[in-house]
Image (spheres, rainbow, N blue to C red):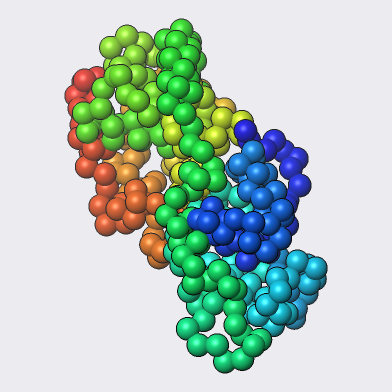
C-alpha cells in the first residue's frame, strides 16, 4: 500500500535502521527498543515509500534536528553519537535527511553489508566502547542476506498479471495513449532488440505493434510518471503513487529528468499530443542516439541518479535503439 500525500515523515535514528535488519536475522526481542523497531518495520511494510527523516545527535550546525537521548541504547551517549555518525558517513547522508523508506533501506543494503566496525569493534579500549552485544552475533548479516523483500514485499505475480490484462485491454481500445516521453526511446530499444508481444514487464512492444501494423496515427500524449497504460505490469511500479521504484527506489528522479530532457529536445511539453507516426519521425530526426537523453555522467557509486543504462550511455548509445530506429524508419519509408 502506498503512502498517499500528504504523509508526515517518520523520524528514526540511523542505528534503528540497522536494528530493524538485525531483528530480521535473529536479534528478536533482544534488540534495544524492540517495540519501536517492530513498529518501524510494520509502518514501512504498510507504506514502503513513506518519508523517513534520519536524525541523530550531531550538534554543531545540525543541532536543529538533534532528537535527544531518549532513544539512546544502553551502551552510552558517546557510543550512540559515534555509531549514528559513522552510519551516516558510510551512507553519505547529512543528519536530518528525509528519504522514501524504500530508498533508505536499499541504500542501507548497498552500503552496509556488515555492522562490524559500526556497532562493535575488534578492540574494546574501555567499558564505554564495548559496543552492542549483538554486533558480532551475525544477526544483522543474516537479516541483510534476506534482502529488501523481507521488509517490503514485491508486487505479486497475480497482481502484475491482472494489471497486464486490464491495461492491454485499455490500450487496445484507446484513441489516445498517455506515455512518459523517454520510454518511447525504450520502446525503440526493445523493438531493435527483438522484443515483441506478449511482453511481461511493460506494454511497449504491444504499443509498437499497434502503431506499426494497425494505427500509425494513434494519438500519443506526453504524460508524467509511470502511467498505468504502459507501466501497469512493471515490477518496479508503485501503483498508489503512479511512481517508479527502480534505481534505489527513486527511479522517478532520473526518469523525470530524461522526460524533461527529451521534451526540450523535441520542443514539446507534458500534455502535448501528436499522431504516433509524426511523433516518431520527430524523435528520429532529433535523437540519433540514446546518449543524447540517457547518459548519466559522474560517479557510478550508489546514487538515486545513476543506473546501468545511464552508465552505458556515457560511452555509447544503446545499439537496440540504433537498430530499432533504422527498422522503423524503413517500415515507414523514411530516409
Q: Residue 147 in the image: x percent, y percent?
A: 45, 50
Position in image of residue 264 (x %, y %): 48, 42
Q: Residue at x 38, y 47 (%)?
A: 294
Task: State whether residue 138 is above or below residue 252.
Answer: below
Which quadrant would residue 58 be assigned to in this image? bottom right
Residue at the extreme bottom of the image, as rendered: 125
| Nearer to the camera, 97 or 290 | 97
Is residue 278 depicted above or below 1 in this figure?
above
Q: Position of residue 97 (x, y in %)?
A: 66, 62
At 64% from the left and 40% from the top, the residue drawn is 47
Say which quadrant the N terminus sits in. top right
Q: Residue at x 42, y 20 (%)?
A: 161
How many discs appear? Answer: 0
Can you give x and y, in whole percent of width and height, for residue 309 in the image? 34, 48
Q: Nearer the viewer, residue 166 or 25?
A: 25
Quick check: 241 above or below 25?
Answer: above
Amino acid at each position: 500500500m502506498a503512502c498517499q500525500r500528504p504523509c508526515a515523515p517518520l523520524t528514526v535514528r540511523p542505528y534503528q535502521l540497522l536494528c530493524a535488519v538485525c531483528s530480521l536475522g535473529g536479534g528478536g526481542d533482544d534488540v534495544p527498543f524492540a517495540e519501536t523497531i517492530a513498529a518501524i518495520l510494520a509502518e514501512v511494510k504498510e507504506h514502503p515509500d513513506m518519508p523517513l527523516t534520519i536524525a541523530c545527535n550531531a550538534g554543531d550546525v545540525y543541532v536543529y534536528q538533534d532528537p535527544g537521548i531518549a532513544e539512546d541504547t544502553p551502551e552510552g551517549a558517546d557510543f550512540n553519537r559515534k555509531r549514528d555518525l559513522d552510519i551516516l558517513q558510510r551512507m553519505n547522508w547529512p543528519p536530518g535527511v528525509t528519504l522514501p523508506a524504500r530508498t533508505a533501506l536499499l541504500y542501507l543494503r548497498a552500503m552496509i553489508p556488515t555492522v562490524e566496525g559500526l556497532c562493535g569493534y575488534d578492540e574494546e579500549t574501555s567499558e564505554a566502547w564495548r559496543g552492542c552485544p549483538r554486533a558480532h552475533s551475525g544477526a544483522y548479516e543474516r537479516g541483510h542476506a534476506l534482502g529488501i523483500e523481507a521488509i517490503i514485499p514485491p508486487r505479486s505475480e497475480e497482481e502484475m498479471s491482472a494489471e497486464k490484462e486490464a491495461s492491454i485491454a485499455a490500450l487496445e481500445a484507446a484513441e489516445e495513449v498517455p506515455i512518459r516521453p523517454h520510454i518511447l526511446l525504450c520502446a525503440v530499444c526493445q523493438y531493435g532488440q527483438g522484443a515483441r508481444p506478449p511482453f511481461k514487464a511493460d506494454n511497449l512492444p504491444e504499443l509498437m505493434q499497434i502503431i506499426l501494423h494497425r494505427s500509425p496515427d494513434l494519438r500519443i500524449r506526453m504524460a508524467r510518471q509511470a502511467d498505468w497504460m504502459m507501466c501497469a505490469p512493471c515490477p518496479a511500479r508503485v501503483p498508489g503513487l503512479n511512481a517508479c521504484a527502480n534505481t534505489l527506489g527513486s527511479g522517478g528522479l532520473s526518469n523525470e529528468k530524461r522526460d524533461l530532457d527529451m521534451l526540450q529536445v523535441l520542443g514539446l511539453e507534458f500534455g502535448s499530443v501528436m499522431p504516433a507516426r509524426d511523433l516518431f519521425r520527430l524523435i528520429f530526426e532529433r535523437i540519433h542516439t540514446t546518449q543524447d537523453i540517457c547518459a548519466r555522467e559522474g560517479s557510478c557509486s550508489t546514487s538515486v541518479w545513476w543506473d546501468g543504462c545511464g552508465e552505458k550511455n556515457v560511452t555509447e548509445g544503446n545499439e537496440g535503439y540504433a537498430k530499432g530506429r533504422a527498422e522503423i524508419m524503413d517500415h515507414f519509408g523514411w530516409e
